[in-house]
């Protein structure tokens, strides 16, 4: 399958060499067989044989800065705050919702998620939810650690960290076994706002350090913790439920694209870039100018869990009217506490370097959020095609039109059918997709419509089959990762399969894509995963599709605007093709899945 995935994406000579390497690896009695045996042994004593390997490879050993490179964001519908109290009221209401949601998680009262779409109906592992408010990604010199707090059913002292003007405040949300109500929360937020206004008490924007590369942040942190004041402050942040970032107005027009940018990096040091703490999984951003959303540290859970949580919160805020009495009186609650920092000259130097790095990231990100209104998944379903597969093929066509070739592509496929399952990869740049995009490049005189639609069908079928393989634990990326990592663990020489150039190419995902569906008026986006790549997040709805495309400006190869413009053209062409020829070319039983060989594993069985 690896050879099939790569054959058409690399030069022929290279492929010949790789084929020999793969055959040697897979030969009876060879290294592959040995490692596979070891992997099977591992599966006997772990709930999920790939989870730790995957977590380290995907996140914890990645040294890149979290903003843009790793942390996805959810951008809320723009809010119209007329005054500061409007935004604080919104924040208090949101925090109430967060506390409600957390008590559902703690009480194991969230309804179990079931798979939708392909192979619908299977219950999904709920483990990721337990990590939403209890995790912390601790930076390390070589690798980070995902730390988990114990969650309890009993209400105990719990706090949120509120970031305001780059200062951090402890907002206790459970005091004397009682959860603060919305009015209390509002009062406390007002107090925080006032405290943040006192210029003489302002401390350096320490949060900027968390926006740096992980090794640099680990180094800075090791200096920071030498002082006990700093240790206490770090401890409070590391043990909080989440952050609520009360942002200053950004001064930019509130378009979807600008709000996405602000959410991804805070707009840099002169805006809200320092008003963050990137190690914490959930940072709820409430901008005075109505730019709101969530920044998410990705290692503990997937975008789908983020969507479930944020959909709950938006519904909560719509369905449960704010319980604030008009004016909040001074309460007897203890005042929120400002976190103190002792900044040595060394820390100042680290801060300057982090600020500089963030500014470069801000300048570099090229983002385009766009709503394609030509049609949505309803039209695609009427063609008896999988909407997700269709969008993936459209993305391949777009890339081909822009760059004249196809590249290794990542599409996240949920493997939550398995205990502790996260994702595997659907390699969407299939040979079938290449045949289709090449045919679409030809003028209709050369490639007749019936052939094009046949190739589209074949490409969609190949994509759908791969999806089914991936969601049932039969894709290749996690498996290869497992074989590679177990060899490392056993201190064996790196098998040639993994030192081969083709392998490096195969995991350099120039196109990194993900479907994050929501019916709420919000959208998810993230940055590219390689310097010359695109991040493409999409949400197919009934009559439209939202695309969030990102790339880096300093790559001469990429342009988000060009990509999106080309994509819109491709989607229209594909629609025309379907309308023109689908009726004649459609297979007799087109709803039938074409995956006769796919082995569907039993519910709940091990990955
Ligand atoms: N004809 C008509 N309808 C079809 C069809 C066909 N041939 N094939 C699929 N459909 C329907 C489905 O029944 C489904 O209907 P629904 O909207 O009523 O539920 C709908 O089209 C969507 O199905 P499809 O487009 O095939 O995709 P999917 O929902 O199965 O999603 C993945 C595919 C890969 C996106 C999904 O399995 C997955 O893994 N999602 C998680 C991705 C993720 O983790 N993202 C976050 C990463 S941070």
Image (cartoon, rainbow, N blue to C red):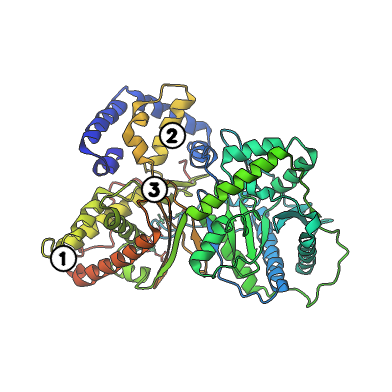
- The answer to whether 203 appears left or right of 357 in the picture is right
- Using the rendered view, name the quadrant where residue 316 is placed: bottom right
Q: 225 above or below 162?
A: above
- Tell me if residue 594 can be seen: no
- Residue 586, how many percent across, how many down? 21, 65
* Quarter of image, ligand 1: bottom left
- Residue 249, how many percent across, how many down? 63, 67
Q: Image point 38% across, 42% down: which residue?
A: 508
- How many neighbours does mark 2 have within 10 angstroms: few (below 14), some (14-19), or many (20 or more)? many
Label 3 with label 2: CB-CB less than 8 Å? no
Instruction: State the residue position of label 3.
Output: 532
- How many neighbours does mark 1 have within 10 angstroms: few (below 14), some (14-19), or many (20 or more)? many
Q: Check mark 2 vs ligand 1: CB closer than 8 Å? yes or no.
A: no
Q: Nearer the viewer, mark 3 or mark 2?
A: 3
Q: Nearer the viewer, mark 1 or mark 2?
A: 1
- Residue 347, how many percent across, how many down? 69, 40
Local secondary structure at mark 3: loop
Q: How many marks?
A: 3
Q: Check mark 3 vs ligand 1: CB closer than 8 Å? yes or no.
A: no
Q: Earlier in the sequence, mark 1 or mark 2?
A: 1
Label 1 with label 3: CB-CB less than 8 Å? no
Rendered image: mark on residue 78: none
Spatial distance from mark 3 to mark 2, Cα to Cα? Answer: 27 Å
- Residue 366, how many percent across, how many down? 45, 57
- How many neighbours does mark 3 have within 10 angstroms: few (below 14), some (14-19), or many (20 or more)? some
Label 1 with label 2: CB-CB less than 8 Å? no
Instruction: State the residue position of label 1.
Output: 449
Rendered image: mark on residue 482: 2
Q: Earlier in the sequence, mark 1 or mark 3?
A: 1
């Amino acid at each position: 399958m690896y050879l099939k995935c790569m054959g058409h994406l690399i030069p022929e000579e290279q492929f010949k060499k790789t084929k020999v390497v793969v055959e040697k690896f897979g030969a009876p009695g060879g290294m592959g067989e040995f490692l596979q045996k070891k992997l099977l042994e591992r599966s006997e004593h772990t709930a999920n044989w790939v989870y730790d390997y995957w977590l380290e490879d995907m996140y914890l050993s990645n040294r890149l800065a979290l903003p843009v490179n790793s942390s996805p964001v959810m951008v809320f519908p723009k809010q119209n705050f007329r005054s500061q109290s409007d935004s604080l009221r919104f924040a208090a209401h949101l925090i109430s919702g967060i506390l409600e949601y957390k008590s559902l998680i703690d009480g194991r009262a969230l309804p179990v998620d079931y798979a939708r779409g392909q192979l619908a109906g299977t219950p999904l592992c709920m483990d990721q939810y337990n990590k939403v408010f209890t995790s912390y990604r601790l930076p390390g010199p070589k690798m980070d650690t995902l730390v988990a707090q114990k969650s309890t059913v009993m209400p105990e002292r719990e706090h949120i960290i509120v970031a305001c003007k780059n200062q951090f405040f402890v907002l206790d949300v459970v005091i004397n076994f009682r959860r603060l109500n919305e009015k209390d929360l509002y009062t406390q937020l007002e107090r925080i706002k006032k405290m943040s206004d006192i210029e003489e008490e302002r401390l350096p924007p320490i949060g900027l350090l968390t926006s740096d590369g992980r090794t640099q942040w680990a180094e800075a942190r090791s200096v920071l913790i030498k002082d006990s004041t700093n240790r206490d402050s770090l401890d409070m942040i590391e043990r909080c439920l989440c952050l609520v970032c009360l942002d200053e107005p950004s001064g930019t027009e509130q378009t979807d694209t600008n709000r996405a940018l602000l959410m991804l990096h805070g707009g840099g040091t002169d805006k809200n870039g320092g008003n963050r703490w990137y190690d914490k999984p959930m940072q709820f951003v409430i901008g005075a100018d109505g730019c709101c959303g969530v920044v998410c540290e990705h290692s503990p859970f997937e975008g789908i869990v983020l969507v479930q949580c944020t959909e709950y919160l938006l519904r909560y805020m719509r369905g449960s009217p704010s319980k604030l009495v008009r004016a909040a009186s001074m309460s007897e609650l203890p005042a929120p506490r400002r976190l103190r920092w002792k900044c040595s000259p060394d820390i100042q130097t680290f801060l300057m370097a982090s600020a500089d790095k963030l500014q470069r990231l801000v300048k570099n990100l090229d983002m385009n959020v766009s709503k394609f209104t030509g049609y949505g998944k309803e039209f695609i379903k009427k063609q008896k095609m999988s909407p997700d597969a269709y969008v993936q093929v459209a993305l391949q066509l777009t890339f081909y039109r822009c760059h004249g070739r196809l590249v290794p592509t990542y599409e996240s496929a949920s493997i939550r059918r398995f205990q502790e399952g996260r994702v595997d990869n659907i390699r969407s740049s299939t040979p079938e997709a290449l045949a289709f995009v090449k045919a679409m490049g030809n003028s209709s005189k050369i490639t007749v419509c019936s052939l094009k639609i046949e190739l589209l069908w074949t490409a969609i079928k190949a994509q759908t089959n791969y999806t089914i393989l991936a969601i049932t634990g039969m894709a290749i990326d996690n498996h290869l990762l497992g074989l590679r990592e177990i060899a490392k663990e056993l201190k064996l020489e790196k098998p040639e399969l993994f030192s081969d150039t083709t392998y490096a190419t195969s995991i350099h995902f120039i196109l990194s894509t993900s479907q994050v569906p929501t019916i709420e008026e919000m959208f998810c986006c993230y940055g590219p995963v390689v310097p010359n790549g695109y991040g493409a997040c999409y949400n197919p709805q009934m009559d439209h599709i939202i695309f969030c495309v990102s790339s880096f400006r300093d790559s001469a190869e990429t342009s988000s605007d060009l990509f999106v413009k080309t994509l819109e053209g491709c989607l229209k062409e594909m629609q025309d093709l379907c309308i023109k020829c689908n009726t004649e070319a459609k297979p007799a039983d087109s709803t039938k899945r074409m995956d006769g060989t796919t082995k569907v594993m039993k519910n709940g069985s091990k990955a």
